[in-house]
Amino acid sequence: MMSGPLILSVHDGGDRVWGVASLEGGGDDFQSEPCARCPWRKDAPVGAFPAEVYRHSARTSYDMSDQVFGCHAAGSRRPRTCAGFLLRGAAHNLAIRLRLSRVDFSAVHSPVELYDNYRAMAVANGVSPDDPALAACRDDEFVTYFPYDGDRRRR
């Protein structure tokens, strides 16, 4: 089994409470469903994380990104990939595409409605739609390498 992802840096969220750990590469650990306060969930409290963390994490949804969106509930001691990201933000992520050859993501699902893509999640949480950090986000398709039950809102 691969070792866990490399923590590249920790970026302060601007409020001295929240921050973002930038992860790169390996690690086969992932959440099978979005955690209770996952920002990808439409029922999660809007504004629970400052807009700055969404600006910083936008790069995970850029075409061919080698950085993944980690689960905030897992923390930095045992980082794992966020289920919401896998379902809505990872279609063009190079790190995830490379993991497909050795990791079975078929257990990833969401019992609740998720934002359609990274941009929608970030804008709902206070990032301007015109923010340069969102310009390169890929919004044009859902992840297609998970089982699809015909209703993209219920995975």
Image (spheres, rainbow, N blue to C red):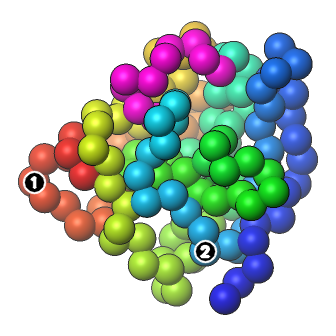
- In the image, what residue type sits under mark 1? Gly
Q: Which residues are magenta?
A: 40-49
47 within the magenta span: yes
Question: x%, y% of residue 102?
Answer: 52, 86
Name the mark on residue 24: none
Element under label 1?
Answer: loop
Picture residue at 61% right of the left edge, 47% below the top: 71
Which image quarter holds the N terminus?
bottom right
Badge 2: few (under 14), some or many (20 or more) residues near its Cα, within 10 Å?
A: many
Q: Is residue 62 visible?
A: no
Query: Could you tell whether 15 is left or right of 91 in the image?
Result: right
Picture residue at 32% right of the left edge, 55% below the top: 109
Taking 81 as reference, is 48 above or below it?
Answer: above
8 within the magenta span: no
Task: Tell me the residue that label 2 is attached to.
Answer: 28
Separation of marks 2 and 1 at Cα, in angstroms: 27 Å
Name the mark on residue 150: 1
Find residue 47 and report its image quarter. Answer: top right
- In the image, what residue type sits under mark 2? Asp
Question: x%, y% of residue 50?
Answer: 69, 16
Picture residue at 66% right of the left edge, 41% below the top: 72
